[in-house]
Amino acid sequence: MDLATQILDLGASARAAARELVKLSTESKNAILLSMADALESDTSAILEANALDMKAGAERGLSAAMLDRLRLDPKRLAAMADGIRQVAGLSDPSGEVIKNWTTHHGLQISKVRVPIGVIGIIYESRPNVTSDAAVLCLKTGNATILRGGSESIHSNLAIARALQQGGAAAGLPPDSIQLVPSTDREAVRFMAEMDKYIDVIVPRGGHSLIEAVMRHARMPVIKHYHGVCHVYVDKDADLEMAAAIVLNSKCQRPGTCNALETLLVHRAVADIFLKSAGALLMEESVQLRGDEATRAILGDTVLLATEADWSTEYLDLILSIRVVDNLEEAVDHIEKYGSRHSDSIVTRDAGAAERFLRDVDSAAVYWNASTRFTDGGEFGMGAEIGISTDKLHARGPMALEELTTYKYQIRGTGQVRG
Amino acid sequence: MDLATQILDLGASARAAARELVKLSTESKNAILLSMADALESDTSAILEANALDMKAGAERGLSAAMLDRLRLDPKRLAAMADGIRQVAGLSDPSGEVIKNWTTHHGLQISKVRVPIGVIGIIYESRPNVTSDAAVLCLKTGNATILRGGSESIHSNLAIARALQQGGAAAGLPPDSIQLVPSTDREAVRFMAEMDKYIDVIVPRGGHSLIEAVMRHARMPVIKHYHGVCHVYVDKDADLEMAAAIVLNSKCQRPGTCNALETLLVHRAVADIFLKSAGALLMEESVQLRGDEATRAILGDTVLLATEADWSTEYLDLILSIRVVDNLEEAVDHIEKYGSRHSDSIVTRDAGAAERFLRDVDSAAVYWNASTRFTDGGEFGMGAEIGISTDKLHARGPMALEELTTYKYQIRGTGQVRG
């Protein structure tokens, strides 16, 4: 069977599974989840063997130590994955929730009801735990999944998917509810993206070329989990001690995450005093600074001159670009031009300035006097997350269970016809 | 300037306008709307002159009488368009509404706030009133629009857009908030669809080839207003008199609309008695019937034999396909296979059967004991509509003001950093 036919088959099976999943009660889905968690633990040795194959191939291909660490599984990480599933079983299920309910003047009872989306395609790279996290969140909300992981973790992903499928089946999971594309052929991504008949939405999580490939071919909605070029703007009326703490936390607490700070914007009126103190703290934390001329005039030549490319770069590393601006509007303009609509923060005591920033910055999460690092499903109190959407439609920012549902209108009448 | 550059220019201007629109109060937007309505009326003669050019070209191109009627404007239709704008000014503005509001254990105050989407591309055919309807609904919610109408109404569209722009400008509408693509070149659709940098969502309203062209090229979310292959399923426990009334209304009250009935499914146990009575009523209304063998065995050879193509055809005409099914599940399977996820209804006295139908049919609007004709923003009480989405993400079913917004998270802190 050629790859295109194989993907179409996965799609048709997933659609059939989705039609069964919509009938399951929350209790049934939770029982399935718990059985999947148990299977993941009882399959530990098989999964670790599969992972060893990936690790060996990764080392031979010369993956970096950081990449190999992301790829590596051990009993502790597997136990954490299983615990994650048990936690999802404990969350409340948004599917079936009545969002609104009203009666029209004809006496029609209209209910806007949350329902599963149907079939969700997840395309991701590197970390094998995404296989479990994504499948489990989709299942909790009654969706079928077609998973496409990276070639570097193919054996691990297959082993994890098999454990989930078998554990699920033992508790009544409809066949084909969770499917993993067994081929590592790049064409599989294209075939998935073109299959709008069977896949209702694709969630790509990965680098630029992966997301580009999905966007180029996709005929269905795509919810991108793209990069975060996040900003902190230190206003002229900022509490500068608070500002320094927020900048340090946003940049250094976990620089490899999408909600970490990449560009610091400072009002000219406080640039000298703020950059001197904060700059020293950042350099103590080994952060490399890249500033505009005004920044270099204050901090000296140890600060590299930022290039145009710096302003739109997601470093994911201990590097920070810095620009001095004349006012709030210039800060907002900079964020509009170079930002990625992820997370941006203003530090100020001026409530009027803060409200303008919160209104005018077109990002998923806009902060006043807080670190950008809080953009996270867990921190927001959602209990879980499939990622952070950088798109504006359907799901924006942390994407958790509710964002894996859509709605339908159920209308109950007594024979009404339209006059 | 070549067309690609021209479209990019429209996009950049629209984005700039969107950034200004987000700052307008509801009062300002309403004043702009009222001024636009006045301008439409005071420009009546210019708009009717432009429309006469389109009518003349349409007649020369041999457009059908129905098409010419859709194209035609007169003082009454223009007054209705202006009144429509005044009604939208009177609706409440969803932008700025706080959807949810909570405080995290860190003391962060998180508000999930409804905001404009940004720049909306509308691609439509034929009826020039869409130019006004779409622009006005988008403006009410704080969005900029790029409109691309059909070539047959280009002069009318340009004249209407000019009136809206000038009337709006007189009341403070930011420049370029409403723009119409002046070129009728088909390539313009492709350039718009590829311009995800400036257009946040495209709403195509039109025929199959228009929607296909948008889907093939779109790099941004598309909310399709596609066809409606709507079903009524008459269950074995139906009140047959009610069923006949619902079938007649769904099919005949306005057969050219997307929520009109196209396929009737009848439970075998009541097929004989129901089809004999309802069939006669339908034929009295000049409805052509196309049935499966079981239907023809009951109603005779005056019923044409339905082909496979009939089941997925949106007739938009006084034609009805009929199939006899063995049970509810077969009806649901038929709808899943041939339907367009628009509007489907079950007629039954059996509440259990009805609830299964409401749960299992994956359509925007699912009805129990009511006509499919109610799927409409006005009938649903939304006060207006830009159309009926046949997509599942972001907006499903009647798409009105709320569906023209997205959300952002505004987070107000007191210096919180992540530990």
Image (cartoon, coloured by chain):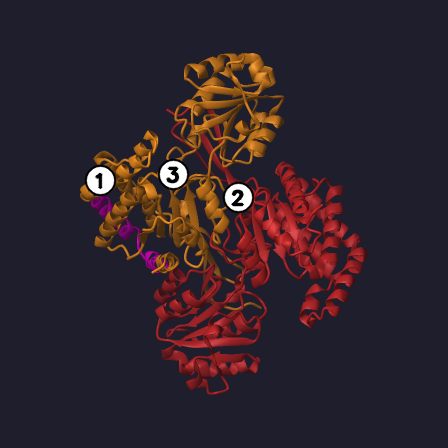
Chain colours: A red, B orange
Instruction: Name the residue nearer the viewer: B292 or B32.
Output: B292
Q: Quadrant of the C terminus of chain A?
A: top left
Question: What residue is drawn where x is 50% and y is 86%?
Answer: A302
Task: Please provide the residue range marked out in magenta.
Answer: B13-40
Q: Look at the numbered disc 1 and give the secondary structure of its residue.
A: helix
Residue A406 position, x and y percent, is 53, 44
Q: Say above or below: B210 vs A319.
A: above
Single out the mark in the foreground, 2 or 1.
1
Q: Label 3 belongs to which residue?
A: B382
Instruction: Indicate the quadrant containing the N terminus of chain A: top left, top right, bottom left or bottom right.
Output: top right
Question: Looking at the rendering, which quadrant does residue B323 occupy?
Answer: top right
Q: Are marks 3 and 2 on the same chain?
A: no
- Taking the spot 68% from the left edge, 53% from the top edge, the residue there is A132
Could you tell whether A158 is left or right of B375 in the image?
right
Left or right: B55 as drawn, with respect to A78: left
Residue A406's mark?
Answer: 2
How packed is label 3: few (under 14 Cα within 10 Å), some, or many (20 or more)?
A: some
Looking at the rendered structure, the kind of residue marked 1 is Leu
**Magenta part mainly helix, strand or loop?**
helix
Q: Are marks 2 and 1 in contact (CB under 8 Å)?
A: no
- Disc 3 marks a residue whose amino acid type is Met
Q: Position of residue A247 (x, y in %)?
A: 49, 73
Q: Which badge, 1 or 3, comes first in the chain's sequence?
A: 1
Q: How many marks?
A: 3
Q: Is residue B317 above or below residue B199?
A: above
